[in-house]
Image (cartoon, grey):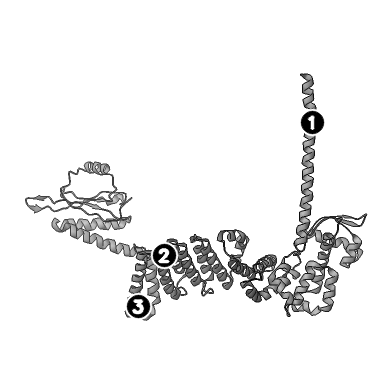
């Protein structure tokens, strides 16, 4: 590799009769950084001077090529120049060096060559920087300046642009010095706050590429935080700023929030950023971008290790995002149920529960309206049971109890006395009857001791005709509510499995009884196998004794 620094050294000058020798020949040896056609001979006299480009040239190869060209030991200047890759610029440098060596005395050679080279380097560097900015539209200068300082300078200059140079220049200098002081003292939280203050004024004005560049540089500062608490505060500042004005470049803001999420190591800091990302997605109408992540919420909860209050906020936001999607109704109800389950009804939750009555009503309505949900735990939740004594919503709670504990006849009785309730909550009577018939069939299976249900019991309980009995049985099987066989000869249904509407103490007791029976059956099977094994081994042993 080549060196980026300029290294110029000149040996003592040789003279003839006390006078400096004119140098008429320049040989620029073709190094890897130069083109082969650069080697030239100028003038008539055999004085030699060579330019060696790059300190990584192979000395043996260099000397061998010298001897092949007829050169002797150098009796003039030897210069070591570490140049850049640009071939055209290298030619210009060689030409300037030739003119200087040809025209001036060797006492001032070093100073003149060095001055010329530095000027050429500066001009070339500025041109390259301009070309890079035109192509990439990036605000971070391609120089040795720290990216953070470059962003601070760019943001402050743009923020104070309308104030005029007399006002802007002192302010820009002050902000740059303050940012530099924060970097030196490693006060990264203060630095983030400083950068966000200027960036907030210009982010709506800059291009998407500049926006992404500025925010990326700011976000990267969280990786330098000294403690997790400092990283958390930095993440809160950045995510809160990105969540403001979410209608402006929402997709880009969401992208930068997820980039910040991946930069963080502290689990709780990640949770904070994720919540802000959901906020931006809702405000910017980009919920489709975050819905796929809801499938991994259980894994996220294990990673974040957040408390009940934070879980409550997360479940509520997700449920609200999903409720407007017709295809995600079941998932919306699931997260809404998890949200309501976080209220215990004691302590501070007792006060907070007054604010969740509308959410509890929404959960009840979603369950009753759904045609593919037949089990829920709402009836045991304090946030829902409070509706029983609520003057406004007591009727909807009574309807929930019917759907979870009673049969079709109880619903019809309720409807005849409270027909206006269904209209109030947007429920359809025919849909409720259809769901209650399936629920009644489940209740028949649950209360059947022999796991057999007659067609006549189904007909009477579901209030249908004889020819419709098998239709409702097949529908229950299709919805995976029942596993059963229909015996048309005996007009009975043999149930092997059924779905429970609620899973409370009776269901746990039933499960315990089944497990006890299974345990006894397994123990009996093991005993039988061991007895058979012993009986098989005894004749074999007796035969061995007879033979011996």
Mark 1 or 2, nearer chain start: 2
Residues tagged 2 and 3 counted as in contact (Cβ below 8 A)? no
Mark 2 or 3, nearer chain start: 2
Label 2, label 3: how far apart the Cα atoms are:
28 Å
> Disc 3 vs disc 1: which is toward the camera?
1
Which residue is at a point 56% across and 59% down the rendered structure image? 303
Q: Residues within 10 Å of mark 2 (few under 14, many from 20)?
A: few
Q: Mark 3 points at which residue?
A: 168
Q: Where is residue 267 in the image (x, y as percent from the top left)?
A: 53, 61
Q: Given the current orientation, which residue lies at the most extreme right position? A: 489
Q: Name the residue under label 2.
A: 135
| SS assignment at label 3 | helix
Give the left or right position of residue 80, taking residue 529 as reference.
left
Q: Which of 222 and 45 is in front in this view?
A: 222
Residue 425 visible in rendering: no
Q: Name the residue under label 1.
A: 536
Residue 272 visible in rendering: yes
């Amino acid at each position: 590799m080549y060196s980026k620094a300029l290294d110029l050294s000149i040996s003592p000058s040789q003279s003839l009769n006390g006078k400096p020798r004119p140098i008429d020949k320049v040989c620029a040896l073709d190094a890897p950084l130069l083109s082969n056609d650069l080697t030239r001979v100028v003038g008539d006299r055999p004085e030699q001077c060579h330019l060696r480009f790059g300190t990584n040239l192979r000395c043996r190869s260099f000397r061998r090529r010298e001897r092949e060209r007829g050169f002797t030991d150098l009796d003039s200047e030897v210069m070591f120049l570490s140049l850049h890759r640009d071939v055209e610029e290298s030619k210009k440098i060689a030409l300037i060096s030739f003119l200087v060596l040809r025209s001036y005395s060797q006492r001032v050679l070093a100073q003149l060559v060095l001055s010329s080279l530095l000027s050429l380097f500066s001009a070339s560097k500025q041109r390259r920087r301009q070309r890079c900015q035109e192509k990439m539209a990036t605000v971070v200068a391609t120089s040795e300046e720290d990216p953070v300082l470059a962003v601070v300078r760019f943001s402050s200059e743009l923020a104070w642009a309308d104030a005029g140079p007399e006002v802007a220049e002192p302010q820009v200098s002050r902000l740059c010095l303050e940012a530099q002081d924060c970097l030196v003292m490693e006060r990264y939280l203060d630095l983030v706050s400083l950068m966000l203050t200027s960036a907030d004024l210009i982010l709506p004005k800059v291009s998407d590429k500049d926006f992404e560049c500025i925010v990326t540089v700011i976000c990267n500062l969280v990786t330098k935080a000294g403690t997790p608490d400092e990283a958390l505060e930095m993440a809160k500042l950045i995510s809160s700023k990105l969540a403001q004005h979410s209608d402006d470049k929402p997709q880009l803001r969401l992208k930068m929030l997820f980039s910040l999420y991946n930069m963080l190591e502290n689990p709780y800091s990640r949770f904070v950023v994720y919540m802000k990302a959901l906020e931006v997605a809702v405000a910017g109408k980009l919920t489709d971008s975050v819905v796929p992540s809801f499938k991994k919420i259980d894994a996220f909860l294990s990673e974040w290790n957040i408390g009940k209050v934070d879980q409550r906020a997360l479940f509520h936001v997700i449920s609200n995002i999903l409720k407007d999607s017709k295809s995600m109704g079941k998932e919306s109800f699931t997260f809404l149920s998890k949200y309501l389950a976080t209220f215990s009804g004691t302590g501070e939750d007792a006060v907070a529960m007054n604010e969740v009555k509308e959410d509890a009503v929404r959960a009840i309505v979603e369950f009753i309206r759904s045609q593919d949900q037949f089990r829920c735990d709402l009836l045991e939740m304090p946030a829902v049971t409070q509706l029983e004594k609520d003057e406004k919503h007591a009727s909807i709670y009574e309807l929930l109890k019917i759907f979870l504990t009673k049969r079709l006849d109880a619903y019809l009785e309720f409807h005849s006395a409270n027909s206006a309730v269904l209209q109030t909550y947007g429920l359809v009577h025919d849909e409720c009857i259809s769901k209650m018939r399936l629920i009644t069939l489940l209740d028949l299976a649950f209360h059947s001791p022999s796991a057999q249900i007659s067609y006549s019991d189904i007909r009477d309980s579901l209030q249908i005709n004889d020819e419709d009995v098998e239709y409702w049985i097949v529908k229950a099987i299709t919805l995976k509510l029942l596993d059963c066989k229909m015996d048309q000869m005996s007009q009975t249904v043999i149930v092997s499995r059924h779905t429970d509407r609620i899973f409370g103490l009776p269901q746990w007791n039933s499960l315990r009884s089944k497990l006890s029976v299974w345990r006894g059956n397994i123990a009996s099977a093991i005993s039988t196998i061991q007895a058979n094994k012993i009986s098989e081994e005894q004749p074999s042993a007796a035969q061995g004794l007879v033979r011996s």
